[in-house]
Image (tube, rainbow, N blue to C red):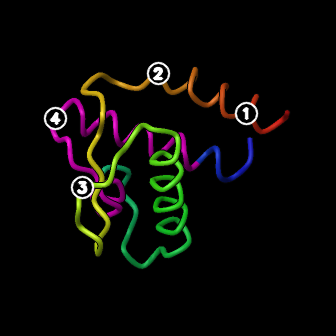
Amino acid sequence: MDFFLKNLTDTLEAINKLIENNINIVNCKRVRRCINIKSSNRSKINFIWRSLNFLENEGILEPNGAIKPKNYKIKNSEKIDIEKFISSIDRKKNI
């Protein structure tokens, strides 16, 4: 598993935690706090916002109007099946 898929998995786990807590608005800071990443770790933060952008393109998230910081609304209030989602992304990547 490459770095992007691993960080995408971490981001999806954080989104599932937010769904459990009835939080429907997601941004990089909330995801970062869920997975205990310090604000000085810019590399991980870049992976998080790339993952959020990717999830927007996949239809999991939708923009919530704010531009900076970019906020997303979770489309479904149900938890995301992480393994199924990652395997489908991996299959698309290999084709």
Q: Are marks 4 and 1 in contact (CB under 8 Å)?
A: no
Q: Position of residue 83 (x, y in %)?
A: 57, 23
Residue drawn where x is 32% and y is 54% of the image: 63
Label 3, on which residue? 64
Mark 1 crowdedness (10 Å alpha carbons): few <14, some 14-19, many ≥20: few
- The residue type indicated by label 2 comes to Asp
Give the CA distance from mark 2 to mark 4. Answer: 17 Å
66 or 86, which is in the foreground?
A: 66
Give the CA distance from mark 3 to mark 4. Answer: 19 Å
Mark 3 vs 2, N-terminal side: 3
Q: Say what secondary structure mark 3 lies in.
A: loop
59 or 33, which is in the foreground?
A: 59
Give the CA distance from mark 3 to mark 1. Answer: 28 Å
Label 4, on which residue? 21
Which one is in front in this view, the residue at disc 3 or the one at disc 4?
A: 3
Q: Is residue 45 above or below residue 4?
A: below
Mark 2 vs 4, N-terminal side: 4
Residue drawn where x is 56% and y is 71% of the image: 43
Q: Is residue 1 above or below residue 77?
A: below
Q: Are marks 2 and 4 in contact (CB under 8 Å)?
A: no
Label 1, on which residue? 90
Of all residues, the one furthest to the front in this rendering is: 65
Residue drawn where x is 42% and y is 37% of the image: 60
Q: Say what secondary structure mark 2 lies in.
A: loop
Mark drawn on residue 46: none
Q: Position of residue 3 (x, y in %)?
A: 68, 53
> What is the magenta range?
7-33
Q: Say what secondary structure mark 4 lies in.
A: loop
Q: Position of residue 72 (x, y in %)?
A: 30, 52
Q: Is residue 28 magenta?
A: yes
Mark drawn on residue 81: 2
